[in-house]
């Protein structure tokens, strides 16, 4: 293979990687806000399933992708409200309640899909938005500027969320509530309110991530569409050490590695099909093993705050 | 003793309350879907208890639920959230199936324990990996068990499509991904003519009692529970916390593996696709409903066995997707973990009870 062929290949893998990393970025940044405030939301997978279905349904039945995406975000917010009520107000064990939320979203999406759609239907999906001029830039143009609008939004979200978290009063409150809630409370910060806001914001982003999968990536819905991406996003939060740019790095590395793996598959190097399917999950386990979470974890993560409890 | 009974009754009341709240919230989904919740719930709850088929199938489902539920209870008691039940069941099933197919000549009294042990070993290894990663590398066990589920599923598919596929599927060119039929000497006897209920139920109940004795009547069990409840105190007392975390996950995965083996030699008589039937997730609900106690899990597994067959009957009778039951189980989990506030926190419990007393 000539050098230019390798270059072409690299461009193709990177282009795809940029596109497929978008849902991970949405979901992981959302989960980061939730965890930064002290709430571990393990229901992301379920929220993404429901978001994916809602967006697909409105794109398919009403041919209105925008409405579908907005409603997916809204439904994600409702799921977040439920999670916040259970884990903040009722102080339930967060690990287990997240699994409950996951199963709830999974079941509802499956039920509604079978009732209203029935079988596999494809939709036209979100169009790529070629930024005039920029797309024609050598190499970088294809990689960065040949995507649908949600991809740009995802990459914009990274610096924005960094700014919000580290440079605004609200971000300071979020970090305070997640590390020293009692001190934050003493300072007059409403711990409950901040946690509700973060869990709901995170879940809305998870809903958007789900919508991305159905209307911008697969252009269809199936009950196994999300395939663990919600849990992978949570793993990326650990890998990224609860920092927006760390998450971006993790999402990109993960997507590039997957891109190479798929290229191996296409290029006809012989190994069992199952190995290629398993690859991302093995990769995530390795990633988790390499990210020692103890050093960066918000100290009050998973600990419900009880004002009256003098511990 | 009287106090104990009161405690149990209070627990049951709260659990049933949580269940009813979950059904109520589920009915909102049904209304959005344009389905009459009363019709759906009638089909789901009343139908299975009104005929022998429903009852038999409920027991058939209760067996794996009981094993997985007890396994998850052990893990939860060590503060390990094992949601890898699906993968552990599948690997247990494939190991059990391979063992039975490899040793068809053994007499039943030897082969069945060998098959169950094979399932336990495979599931135990799979659970143990997650336990080890938690203990040594502090890898979040929820995420590792989820990833291990996907990996196990592919191993499972690969084996029943390839090396372990029924030779006659290849000969006839049908290629259904399933193993050959298990030898008769490995199969649990059916208890009722024409129904699938099988003698594995007795094995499951015996195992449930064994686990109870192991956890509540031995030093090993005491340590295992202490590690979950007071890890620091256990550490000071000289208990190797890491070791017990891994052991808890091995036991937890092993029990799910047993569920897989029993499904193979009791229900399907082959290893085939869809065998794990989400029992790995339903087992979480069963464990919580059984209050993480082996003897509580037994009745809880029958209860959810009924619910699962009820959901299938509902799908056939009134055309409401059985996936609904997954969302109801999710709501039950949410309701039960929320109810812990009044079950375990004396302050809120007092508030809650006085609220009711005032109303009465």
Image (tube, coloured by chain):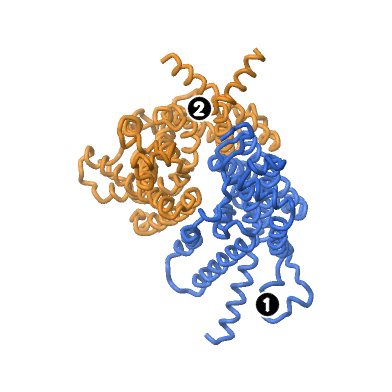
Q: How many marks?
A: 2
Chain painted orange: B
Disc ID at residue A140: 1
Would you say the residues marked 2 and 1 are in contact, meaning their CB atoms lie under 8 Å apart?
Answer: no
Q: State which chain disc 1 sits on.
A: A
* Secondary element at image label 2: helix
Q: Relative to residue B101, is residue B199 depicted above or below?
A: above
Residue B254 seen in the current view: no
Please state if B151 lies on the left or on the right of A225 as rendered.
Answer: left
State the separation of the CA atoms marked 2 and 1: 62 Å
User: Viewer-nearest of labels 2 and 1?
Assistant: 1
Q: Quadrant of residue B333?
A: top right
Determine the chain carrying the residue at label 2. Answer: B
Return the residue found at the far bottom.
A2
Rendered location of residue A60, percent (x, y): 72, 53
Q: Residues within 10 Å of mark 2 (few under 14, many from 20)?
A: many
Instruction: Give the label on residue B48, or none.
Output: 2
| Rendered location of residue A72, percent (x, y) | 71, 49
Name the residue at 50% across, 59% down: A291
Q: Residue furthest right?
A: A132
Q: Position of residue B82 (x, y in %)?
A: 46, 44
| Rendered position, A263 above or below B78 | below
Q: Are marks 2 and 1 on the same chain?
A: no
The local secondary structure at tag 1 comes to helix
Residue at image point 32% right, 47% down: B121
**Residue, x 72% and y 56% (percent of image)?**
A164
Q: Which chain is blue?
A: A
Can you give x and y, in whole percent of width and height, for residue A298 in the image? 58, 50
Compare residues B200 and A227 and report the one nearer the observer: A227
């Amino acid at each position: 293979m000539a050098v230019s062929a390798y270059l072409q290949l690299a461009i193709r893998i990177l282009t795809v990687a940029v596109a497929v990393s978008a849902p991970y970025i949405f979901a992981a940044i959302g989960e980061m806000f939730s965890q930064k405030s002290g709430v571990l939301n393990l229901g992301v997978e379920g929220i993404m399933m429901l978001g994916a279905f809602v967006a697909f349904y409105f794109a398919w039945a009403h041919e209105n992708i925008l409405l579908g995406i907005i409603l997916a975000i809204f439904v994600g917010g409702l799921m977040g409200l439920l999670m916040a009520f259970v884990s903040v107000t009722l102080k339930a064990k967060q690990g287990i309640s997240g699994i409950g939320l996951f199963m709830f979203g999974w079941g509802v999406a499956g039920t509604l899909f079978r009732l209203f759609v029935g079988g596999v239907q494809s939709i036209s999906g979100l169009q790529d938005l070629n930024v005039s001029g920029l797309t024609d830039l050598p190499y970088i143009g294809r990689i960065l500027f040949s995507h649908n609008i949600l991809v740009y939004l995802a990459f914009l979200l990274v610096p924005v969320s960094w700014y919000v978290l580290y440079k605004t009063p609200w971000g300071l409150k979020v970090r305070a509530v997640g590390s020293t809630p009692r001190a934050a409370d003493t300072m007059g910060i409403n711990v409950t309110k901040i946690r509700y806001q973060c869990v709901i914001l995170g879940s809305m982003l998870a809903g958007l991530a789900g919508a991305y999968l159905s209307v911008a990536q697969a252009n269809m819905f199936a009950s196994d569409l999300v395939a663990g991406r919600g849990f992978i996003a949570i793993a990326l939060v650990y890998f990224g050490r609860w920092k927006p740019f760390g998450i971006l790095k993790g999402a990109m590395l993960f997507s590039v590695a997957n891109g190479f793996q798929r290229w191996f598959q296409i290029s006809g190097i012989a190994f069992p099909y199952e190995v290629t399917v398993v690859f991302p999950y093995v990769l995530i386990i390795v990633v988790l093993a390499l990210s020692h979470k103890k050093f960066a974890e918000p100290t009050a993560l998973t600990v419900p705050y009880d004002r009256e409890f003098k511990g | 003793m009287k106090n104990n009974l009161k405690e149990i009754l209070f627990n049951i009341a709260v659990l049933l309350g949580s269940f009813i709240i979950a059904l109520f919230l589920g009915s909102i989904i049904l209304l959005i879907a344009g389905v009459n919740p009363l019709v759906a719930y009638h089909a789901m709850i009343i139908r299975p208890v009104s005929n022998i088929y429903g009852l038999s199938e409920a027991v058939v489902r209760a067996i794996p639920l009981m094993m997985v539920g007890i396994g998850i209870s052990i893990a939860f008691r060590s503060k390990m959230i094992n949601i890898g039940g699906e993968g552990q069941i599948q690997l247990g099933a494939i190991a059990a199936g391979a063992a039975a197919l490899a040793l068809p000549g053994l007499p039943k009294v030897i082969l069945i324990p060998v098959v169950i042990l094979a399932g336990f070993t495979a599931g135990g290894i799979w659970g143990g990996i997650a336990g080890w990663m938690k203990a040594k590398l502090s890898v979040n066990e929820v995420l590792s068990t989820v990833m291990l589920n996907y990996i196990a599923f592919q191993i499972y598919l690969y084996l029943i499509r390839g090396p372990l596929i029924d030779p006659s599927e290849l000969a006839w060119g049908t290629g259904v991904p399933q193993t050959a039929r298990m030898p008769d000497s490995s199969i649990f006897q059916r208890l009722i003519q024409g129904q699938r209920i099988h003698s594995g139920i007795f094995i499951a109940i015996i195992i449930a009692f064994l686990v109870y004795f192991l956890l509540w009547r031995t030093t090993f069990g005491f340590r295992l529970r202490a590690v979950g409840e007071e890890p620091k105190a256990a550490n000071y007392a000289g208990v190797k916390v890491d070791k017990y975390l891994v052991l808890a996950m091995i036991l937890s995965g092993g029990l799910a593996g047993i569920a897989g083996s029993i499904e193979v030699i009791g229900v399907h008589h082959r290893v085939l696709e869809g065998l794990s039937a989400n029992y790995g997730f339903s087992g979480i609900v069963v464990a919580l409903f059984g209050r993480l106690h082996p003897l509580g899990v037994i009745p809880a597994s029958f209860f959810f066995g009924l619910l699962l067959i009820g959901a299938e009957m509902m799908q056939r009778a009134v055309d409401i997707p059985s996936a609904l039951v997954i969302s109801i189980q999710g709501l039950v989990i949410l309701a039960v973990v929320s109810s812990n506030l009044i079950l375990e926190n004396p302050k809120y419990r007092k508030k809650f009870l006085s609220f009711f007393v005032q109303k009465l």
